[in-house]
Image (tube, grey):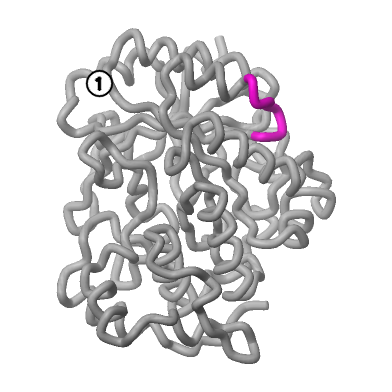
Amino acid sequence: MPAESPEHLRTSLAAAMTLDLKSGLFYRNAKSPCVNLLLTYDDGCAGRCAYCGLSLERQGAYGDKSFIRVGWPAYRLSDMMERIAERGSRVKRVCISMITNERARGDVSEIIQELRNRLEIPISLLVTPTILEKNDLMRYKAEGVDMAGVAVDCATPELFGTYRGSGVGGPHTWNRYWQCLEEAIDVFGEGMAGAHLIVGLGETEREMAGTMQKVHDLGGYTHLFSFFPEKDSMLAERPLPPIGQYRRMQLARYLVDEGTCSSKDFKFDATDRLTSFGLPDNELATVIETGRPFMTSGCAGRDGEVACNRPYANCVPGQEIRNYPFTPDDMDIKMIGEQLWRRDKRWG
């Protein structure tokens, strides 16, 4: 019998380690308080996103495909719920991730109900707008989901079309994704829904800052990722964005999401590289020294701190951490300060 949803789900290596389903140690003793559950089917995902390890275009069986850099082993939902219940102090949130498969629409409801019947824990849902309507979001909320995310990923409609839509023969459209984001904010409430955005797909810093502002103005928040080349994907040869570019976008995201600044306050050079955040130097330094702008942005647990911190999901553990899954220490802050205005050549 195939290991398919809703009885089986894949989970990230970090979550499997948190649940003691896999052995291993986290670099610098990072923690992973969110269990990510990814729906799985033998016929996989119908998306053809150029950067995604789950893409229909990527060779191999769907169950063997990696996602955001690491493997995602499959387990029985019942077994994982038992582990979550036994390790309640470690797990602060569960996030269900849909894929573009029509079966996911109904299976998500069954999974939500199973979780809600067994566990008292916040549940997030990363939705697939292409196969959903607003009524689905309303049903998921009624069943127990409290937060939702929409993986817009690309900062411009042109990049979205190139890497997710007609450019790769994919089913997704820019307009539907933004419509779904608005629906999610309406259903779950302001600050309870948001967009995933990926830095390094060819956008300018001005474009990314403007897109993050658009999310904020709608009442949402941004979960920021650094592009990471997925082996055997269509963008496998594309390099990571320069660390300086990513640090500036992290700081911009934090200032926008916190309402400290608007992207209209930012200044850019002739190449649309961000040169000023529009804050006095001492105020900006105070924000940087907290380290918080450079930590993973994700759904919070009941304690208000980010639970979905995805340790090392878009970088190799080491000195050049992209999203810190813990509060950066003094040495980290010093290095971040050096990286922030680095003038690396931007990949076009």
Q: Specify the quadrant that holds the C terminus.
A: bottom right
What residue sits 61% from the left and 32% below the top?
A: 99
Name the amino acid, label 1: Arg
Element marked by disc 1: helix
Report whether residue 335 is seen.
no
238 within the magenta span:
no
Left/right placement of residue 260 relative to residue 304 reads: right
Dot 1 alpha-carbon crowd within 10 angstroms: few under 14, some 14 to 19, many 20 or more: some
Q: Position of residue 223 (x, y in %)?
A: 46, 52
Residue extent of the magenta highlight? 129-135
Given residues 82 and 141, the one toward you in this image is: 141
Q: Position of residue 100 (x, y in %)?
A: 67, 32
Q: Position of residue 196 (x, y in %)?
A: 53, 50
Image quarter for residue 260? Answer: bottom left
Which residue bears the numbered disc 1? 83
Q: Position of residue 297 (x, y in %)?
A: 38, 53
